[in-house]
Amino acid sequence: MIYRTDLGKRECFNIEIKARCRNPNLIRKILKRKRAEFIGVDHQIDTYFKLPPKGGKLKLREGDIEKELIFYKRENRKGPKKSEAILVNNPGNGTKELLANLLGITAVVDKRREIFCIKNVRFHIDQVSELGEFVEIEASNKPRNNGNSKNGTLKKEILLKQVNEYMRLFEMKGEDLVSKSYSDMLIEGTRRTSSQKHPAGIAETRAGNGEPKGNMRWKKTARHGVQTARTAIVY
């Protein structure tokens, strides 16, 4: 379910997929042919904060188009899956520093996102730093007046059918589907690199505005002027 604070509580959810994008131009052509609305290109910095295992994910998105604090729960599996979330639009100044000090930072995802929309379905073509190019399809059950809806919302079966149809149009293959979030992919990649260099193990970190423990790499995000860790891994 998705709750947007600027609109009040709305019980919504997505059926969505993420996949590696082999041919972004094909997807752009198909979306143009389908007369998709082009929302724009957004440079997004997603900062993920530490939560208990299986407690979901909490991230602050800083972009020119999208500025949101997002808590979500989603299965880590390939193929279409249900995503439930709570969104706070335009969180106040100091949110990142507050959460970083309270919870700690686990990862920072830097990406360029092209955003398209056809009715209740959103499409993202992402270029993610250190990971590559991906495509996302997100079908939402947000209110839409048609015969397939109940109480103003679309059924899960309709959303699943929409996602599968666009997967077919985009010529997606099973091996292209991704089960994990960008943050998990970054963290796992860093851990593999670290374990090869330092097989003795990985130490814990202290995120936020304090000094890092050990040889932690910091990245200065010029747009936001806040010092954050690319991934909260210490060698």
Image (spheres, helix red, strand yellow):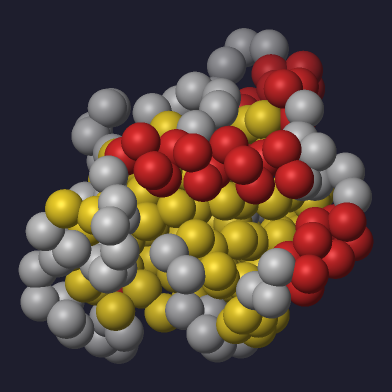
**Residue 117 visible here:** yes
Residue 56 rendering spot, x and y as whole percentages: 28, 39
Q: Which of 165 and 196 is in front in this view?
A: 165
Left or right of 110 in this view: 56: left
Quadrant of the rendered image containing residue 171: top right
Left or right of 126 in this view: 47: left
Residue 2 rendering spot, x and y as whole percentages: 24, 58
Residue farthest top in this picture: 200
Residue 5 rendering spot, x and y as whole percentages: 16, 76
Residue farthest front in this picture: 147
Left or right of 20 in this view: 111: left
Q: Nearer the viewer, residue 131 or 6?
A: 6
Question: Which image quadrant: the C terminus?
Answer: top right
Which residue is rendered at x = 56% and y = 24% of the image?
Answer: 78
In the rendered image of this protein, does residue 85 appear above or below residue 56?
below
Quadrant of the rendered image containing residue 189: top right
In the rendered image of this protein, does residue 91 appear above or below residue 14?
below
Quadrant of the rendered image containing residue 22: top right
Which residue is rendered at x = 53% and y = 63% of the image?
Answer: 122
In the rendered image of this protein, does residue 196 appear above or below residue 99?
above
Q: Nearer the viewer, residue 187 or 18?
A: 18
Left or right of 7 in this view: 67: right
Which residue is rendered at x = 43% and y = 64% of the image?
Answer: 120
Residue 27 rendering spot, x and y as whole percentages: 80, 57
Which residue is rendered at x = 18% and y = 63% of the image?
Answer: 152
Number of numbered discs on residues: 0
**Residue 216 visible here:** no
